[in-house]
Image (cartoon, rainbow, N blue to C red):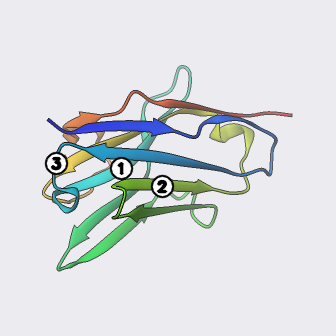
Amino acid sequence: QLQLVESGGGLVQPGGSLRLSCRVSGGTFHAWGIGWFRQAPGAEREEVSCLGYSGGGSTTTYADSVKGRFTISRDETTNIVYLQMHGLKPEDTAVYYCAALYRGICSRASSEYQFWGQGTQVTVSS
């Protein structure tokens, strides 16, 4: 049973930065694509970024709304996937979740992910 635990959320002013962490345990790290999703009140859950594995290397994807501002990365020594967020905007306010999809692939469809963390709140406000 894979377990994912997010941390790093909080309140930040517009233009500020946060780094979210997703600690993954209970499985082989490279067997899973790890996606970051977010859900604002009254909105559907949307993919923000994903880290997958293909052909012996890693692949990354980003939503258009965060390209150039967010960076996904992993630390294989600690099994943590990070989401570094810069230039935060009020519209980035949401609960952020990390999720795992088997076979190391990524998908924009949240329904395809098998395991989820509990979420961490990010609030961007002055």
User: Quick one: label 1 or label 3, which is nearer the N terminus?
Assistant: 3
Quadrant showing the N terminus = top left
In the image, residue 110 above or below residue 51: above
User: Quick one: label 3 or label 2, which is nearer the N terminus?
Assistant: 3
In whole angstroms, how far apart are the C-alphas of marks 3 and 2? 18 Å
User: At x 45% / y 64%, what residue is drawn?
Assistant: 73
Query: Closer to the camera: disc 3 or disc 2?
Result: 3
Q: Which numbered tag is attached to residue 82?
A: 2
In this rendering, would 92 be left or right of 20?
Answer: right
Q: Which numbered tag is attached to residue 35?
A: 1
Q: Amino acid at mark 3?
A: Gly
Q: Which numbered tag is attached to residue 6?
A: none
Tell me residue 28's x, y (percent). 16, 55
In whole angstroms, how far apart are the C-alphas of marks 1 and 3? 16 Å
Query: Closer to the camera: disc 2 or disc 1?
Result: 2
Quadrant showing the C terminus = top right
Tell me residue 39's x, y (percent). 49, 31
Q: Which numbered tag is attached to residue 27?
A: 3
Q: Nearer the viewer, residue 37 or 80?
A: 80
Question: What secondary structure is found at the residue carrying circle 3?
Answer: loop
Q: Are marks 3 and 2 in contact (CB under 8 Å)?
A: no
Residue 87 lies in quadrant: bottom right
Residue 67 lies in quadrant: bottom right
User: Quick one: label 2 or label 1, which is nearer the N terminus?
Assistant: 1
Tell me residue 105's x, y (percent). 21, 59
Q: Nearer the viewer, residue 51 or 10?
A: 10
Query: Closer to the camera: disc 1 or disc 3?
Result: 3
Give the residue furthest to the front.
Answer: 77
